[in-house]
Image: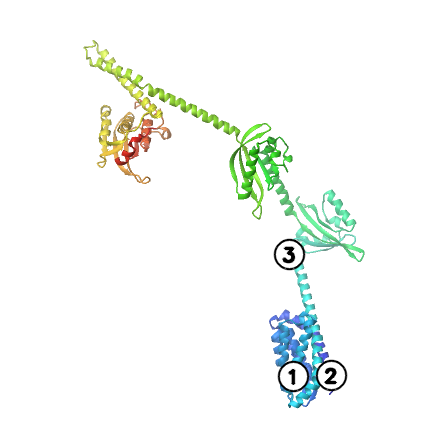
């Protein structure tokens, strides 16, 4: 058979390829939809079937040797289905070739192997998908790679003769088949991909339409509604069936007159429209808000209707209304505030000022926007520079500056302002604007100044009183001592009888009254001396036992006269303490005197014990005076140690004294860096605890000369 006759005979096999190409797309879609995992196996089986069919129409070129386009089927199987398809097609076709037998069996199997490899290479590098520039050389190389297998047919001289005679027509036929059929298959694959993408897009749009709260609508040329998507009923609450066929103007609700006119103009001119809002009232009295968009449709130059979308914007509109209401409330609240509130942009220009700021600047609030600070208020140059520097500091640090004083001259005078600057950042963390809050502190500053002056005057008057009483100490004590001394001589009748017992009683009364008055004067003078800072402590080691007992000796007779017991408990560990002996004597004397005044039965106990101060880590002394008297009312406890405060009178208890005893004790305790606590139960008694540090003598040697002041 001549080469040209062989070429045309092989091309007759293209009919089989036409069948394969025609069935490829539906088979491929079915495989992808129903058994995607076995798609490549199915495509390989399809092409192996085509190869076997082609072998039924094989052309005999020698005894036991046939040629057909089976190798092209195997190559295309690899191109379309990868290694799986190529191997399935090669094995299936090879088995049938073995079944046919003959001298060309080995050559046929070799050609099938080479074809499978060629198809896999083309599939791997997607050569057919890259266009003709890649498909042509790939097809040519695949065809050429098959031709050497002719040499394996029979003896070498026969194989050589067949190769020389058949290589060109056979290779050309395979090349043309690969190019034509490969192009058709690639085109079908491309069409299938486009259709699949379109179907995906269509399904995506359907899903969007069904899941969205919006709806789609269409009208005819007369603007009657012809289509409504499923979202219409959900978005509007209206029946789609009742709406279809109605004119668009009967479907849409109330619009603002200006918007309605523009909307009608758009329909009349067949123009698109966007974001047209309208409202509809429900039977329940609620107001629903909607928004529609639309574009005109034309068939050539003929208008055929509108198509568009609709949205329910009720939630948004209600939010806008509420937001406007909140903004109005906020604005009115800010304007009603008596403080100045302003907002500047990053360029130092005001964008807002409340009513208080505008009033003080003598302008309307609407005039503030766009101005700078030097356009509004009169300040010295250095003040402007300071304000700008503070603004720059806030801009740079992005942190607020709070409560700095500034004196500003307004049209109505000078004011002392207390100013804070707060930066407001945008989403990127940069300065958006600066809020300034200014409080007119002039009145408060004046009140503070007046108060400080009043306090200074009161303190000066108090010091003058204390200085007066301290200075009058000698003048007050000397006459009283003379009265007490002479009355004592008279009642003792040292210079002879007075002549009548009544004179003796009068002398006793004069002596007792003078002594009592001297005690009151002494208390007043002690308190005044403390306040005037004239009494000082003489810190030195003293015998606590001798000091306490010395004070109690002066009160023993009083206790005995009232039938009260007076007991002392002093720890053996306290032979000496570091304190002012006169002050300790006075503390004991005042506390026990108070206890005797308000105790009618039982007794008074004085105890002195060492304690450990856990906070200071130092030894301390606790001096406690307990009685079984009437106690102190709870409401009086917070001020019981203040000067001139006394426990209310009791019918069974004498209420003598100046009310300075506890005040003096409190001052003397503080002078020792100590504390005084009082525990009292009305009707059962009172315990006063005085705790002060027991400084070691070595420390007092260094500090003794310091002479700490009382009070």
Gap in Å between the C-alphas at discs 2 and 1?
21 Å
**At 64% across and 35% down in the image, what residue appears?**
366
Q: Nearer the viewer, mark 3 or mark 1?
A: 1
| Secondary structure type for disc 1 | helix
Q: Is residue 365 left or right of residue 473?
A: right
Q: Are marks 2 and 3 in contact (CB under 8 Å)?
A: no
Image location of residue 497, percent across then percent down: 19, 10
Q: How many marks?
A: 3
On the image, numbered disc 1 is attached to which residue? 148
- The crowd level at tag 2 (other Cα within 10 Å; few <14, some 14-19, many 20+) is some
| Residue 9, label in figure | 2
Quarter of image, res 666: top left
Q: Nearer the viewer, residue 283 or 195?
A: 195
Which of the two residues, 339 or 397, is positioned nearer the viewer here? 397
Question: Mark 2 touching mark 1, by CB under 8 A?
Answer: no
Residue 414 position, x and y percent, is 56, 28
Q: Nearer the viewer, residue 642 or 536?
A: 536
Q: Residue furthest right?
A: 301
Instruction: Give the residue number, with chain letter if any, for mark 3.
Output: 211
């Amino acid at each position: 058979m001549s080469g040209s006759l062989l070429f045309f005979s092989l091309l007759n096999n293209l009919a089989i390829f036409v069948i394969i190409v025609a069935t490829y797309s539906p088979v491929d879609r079915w495989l992808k939809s129903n058994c995607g995992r076995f798609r490549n196996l199915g495509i390989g089986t399809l092409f192996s079937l085509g190869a076997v069919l082609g072998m039924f129409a094989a052309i005999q070129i020698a005894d036991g040797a046939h040629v057909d386009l089976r190798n092209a089927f195997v190559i295309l199987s690899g191109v379309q289905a990868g290694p799986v398809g190529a191997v399935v097609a090669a094995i299936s076709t090879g088995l049938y070739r073995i079944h046919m037998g003959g001298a060309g069996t080995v050559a046929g199997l070799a050609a099938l192997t080479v074809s499978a490899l060629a198809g896999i290479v083309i599939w791997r590098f997607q050569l057919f998908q890259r266009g003709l520039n890649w498909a042509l050389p790939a097809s040519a190389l695949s065809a050429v790679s098959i031709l050497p297998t002719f040499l394996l047919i029979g003896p070498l001289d026969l194989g050589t003769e067949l190769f020389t005679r058949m290589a060109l027509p056979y290779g050309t036929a395979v090349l043309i088949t690969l190019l034509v059929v490969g192009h058709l298959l690639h085109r079908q694959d491309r069409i299938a991909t486009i259709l699949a993408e379109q179907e995906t897009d269509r399904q995506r749009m359907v899903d969007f339409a069904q899941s969205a709260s919006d709806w789609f609508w269409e009208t005819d040329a007369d603007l009657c509604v012809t289509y409504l998507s499923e979202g219409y009923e959900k978005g509007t609450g209206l029946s789609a069936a009742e709406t279809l066929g109605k004119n668009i103007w009967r479907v849409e609700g109330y619009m603002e007159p200006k918007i309605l006119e523009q909307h009608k103009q758009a329909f009349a001119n067949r123009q698109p429209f966007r974001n047209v809002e309208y409202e509809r009232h429900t039977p329940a009295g609620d107001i629903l808000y909607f928004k529609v968009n639309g574009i005109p449709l034309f068939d050539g130059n003929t208008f055929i209707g509108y198509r568009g979308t609709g949205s329910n914007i009720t939630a948004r509109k209600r939010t806008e209304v509420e937001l406007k209401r909140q903004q109005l409330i906020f604005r009115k609240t800010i304007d009603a505030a008596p403080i100045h509130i302003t907002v500047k942009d990053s360029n130092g220009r005001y964008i807002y000022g409340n009513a208080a700021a505008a009033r003080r600047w003598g302008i309307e609030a609407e005039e503030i926007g766009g101005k700078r600070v030097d356009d509004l208020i009169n300040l010295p140059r250095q003040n402007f520079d300071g304000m700008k520097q503070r603004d720059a500091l806030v801009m740079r640090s992005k942190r607020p500056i709070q409560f700095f004083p500034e004196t500003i001259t307004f049209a109505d005078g000078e004011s002392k302002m207390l100013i804070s600057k707060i930066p407001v950042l945008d989403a990127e963390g940069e300065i958006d604007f600066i809020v300034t809050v200014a409080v007119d502190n002039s009145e408060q500053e004046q009140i503070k100044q007046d108060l400080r002056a009043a306090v200074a005057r009161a303190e000066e008057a108090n010091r003058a009183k204390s200085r007066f009483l301290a200075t009058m100490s000698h003048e007050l004590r000397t006459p009283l001592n003379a009265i007490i001394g002479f009355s004592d001589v008279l009642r003792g009748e040292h210079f002879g009888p007075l002549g009548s017992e009544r004179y003796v009683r009068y002398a006793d009364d004069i002596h007792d009254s003078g002594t009592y008055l001297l005690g009151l004067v002494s208390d007043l003078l002690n308190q005044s001396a403390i306040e005037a800072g004239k009494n000082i402590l003489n810190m030195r080691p003293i015998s606590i036992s001798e000091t306490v007992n010395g004070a109690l000796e002066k009160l023993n007779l009083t206790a005995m006269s009232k039938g009260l017991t007076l007991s002392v408990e002093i720890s053996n560990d306290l032979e000496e303490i570091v304190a002012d002996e006169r002050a300790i004597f006075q503390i004991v004397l005042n506390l026990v005197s108070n206890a005797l005044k308000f105790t009618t039965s039982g007794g008074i106990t004085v105890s002195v014990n060492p304690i450990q101060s856990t906070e200071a880590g130092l030894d301390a002394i606790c001096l406690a005076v307990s009685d079984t008297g009437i106690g102190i009312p709870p409401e009086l406890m917070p001020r019981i140690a203040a000067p001139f405060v006394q426990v209310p009178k009791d019918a069974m208890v004498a209420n003598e004294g100046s009310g300075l005893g506890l005040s003096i004790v409190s001052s003397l305790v503080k002078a020792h860096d100590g504390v005084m606590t009082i525990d009292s139960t009305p009707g059962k008694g009172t315990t006063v605890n005085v705790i002060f540090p027991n400084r070691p003598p070595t420390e007092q040697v260094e500090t003794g000369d310091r002479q700490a002041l009382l009070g």
